[in-house]
Image (tube, rainbow, N blue to C red):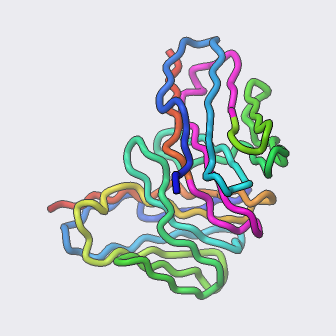
């Protein structure tokens, strides 16, 4: 059983550039979550998919952030026109079918650094 | 909004000692989870608690879901150097099943 996979693990980019991160959830998991974690803090919820449907996106930090899960399998998180404040660890988590209290399993994240 | 308060923020202990950390909330949660995170990695699930009053063990780890559903504690017995990391509590209670995390307890173990 492979866990949640995220790519790339690290991304360094200049301010103003667009970045895209990919998440491959555990194969039988239909729920997928994106979180952001800054230094000294716990992960902060951003958005959620059930299969291909994005059911919650009001927590995305600004309209520069968007996420997709076109076929209900992998997901991408895009940040446009990056700013220095976007520097953080971006974590993806997935959970299986069943009631929404199923525990979430996390990937190792993508660490974004904005120069 | 919902917030979780974790304490202590950090702990420095000697190998072999027992550890206790806790988490309190202003809101009720239906599920409490405890995760451990090591540098450069994502949080790893340690224990999940589903019922008020539930006491669950995973090896040297024991966690309890408070009766009021507003708190939980995690105990680690006979600590070892590989227990080093940041321990997060998380409440599962967002409208979409999202997790709400505390700020973590950083554990350091001296051999």
Q: Say if B14 sits above or below B51 in the image.
A: above
Relative placement, left or right, of B78 versus B44 is: left
Q: Say if A1 sits above or below A52 in the image.
A: below
Seen from this angle, which residue lies furthest left?
B111
Quick check: is A86 in the magenta stretch?
A: yes
**Residue B14 image-quadrant placement:** bottom left
Relative placement, left or right, of A108 versus A98 is: left
The residue under the point 31% across, 62% down is: B83
The image shows residue B50 at horizontal and vertical percentages of 64, 78
The residue under the point 43% across, 77% down is: B58
Query: What segment is highlighted magenta in the picture?
Result: A76-105
**Residue B51 image-quadrant placement:** bottom right
Q: Say if B82 sits above or below A52 in the image.
A: below
Quick check: is B34 in the magenta stretch?
A: no
Count all numbered tags in the image, as a single digit.
0
Relative placement, left or right, of B110 versus A64 is: left
The residue under the point 68% across, 40% down is: A74
The image shows residue A113 at horizontal and vertical percentages of 50, 24
The residue under the point 66% across, 43% down is: A34
The residue closer to the viewer here, A111 or A59, is A111
């Amino acid at each position: 059983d492979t866990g949640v996979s995220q790519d790339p693990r690290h991304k360094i980019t200049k301010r103003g550039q667009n970045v895209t991160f990919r998440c491959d959830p555990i194969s039988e998991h239909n729920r997928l979550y994106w979180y952001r974690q800054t230094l000294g803090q716990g992960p902060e919820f951003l958005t959620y998919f059930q299969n291909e449907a994005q059911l919650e996106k009001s927590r995305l930090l600004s309209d520069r952030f968007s996420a997709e899960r076109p076929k209900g399998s992998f997901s991408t998180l895009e940040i446009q026109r990056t700013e220095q404040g976007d520097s953080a660890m971006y974590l993806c988590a997935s959970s299986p079918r069943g009631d929404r209290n199923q525990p979430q399993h996390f990937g190792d994240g993508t660490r974004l650094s904005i120069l | 909004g919902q917030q979780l308060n974790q304490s202590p923020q950090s702990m420095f202990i000697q190998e072999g000692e027992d550890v206790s950390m806790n988490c309190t909330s202003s809101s009720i949660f239906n599920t409490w989870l405890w995760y451990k995170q090591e540098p450069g990695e994502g949080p790893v699930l340690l224990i999940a608690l589903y019922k008020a009053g539930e006491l669950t063990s995973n090896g040297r780890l024991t966690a309890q879901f408070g009766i009021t559903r507003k708190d939980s504690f995690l105990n680690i017995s006979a600590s070892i150097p590989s227990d080093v990391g940041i321990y997060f509590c998380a409440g599962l209670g967002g409208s979409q099943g999202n997790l709400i995390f505390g700020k973590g307890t950083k554990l350091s173990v001296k051999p």
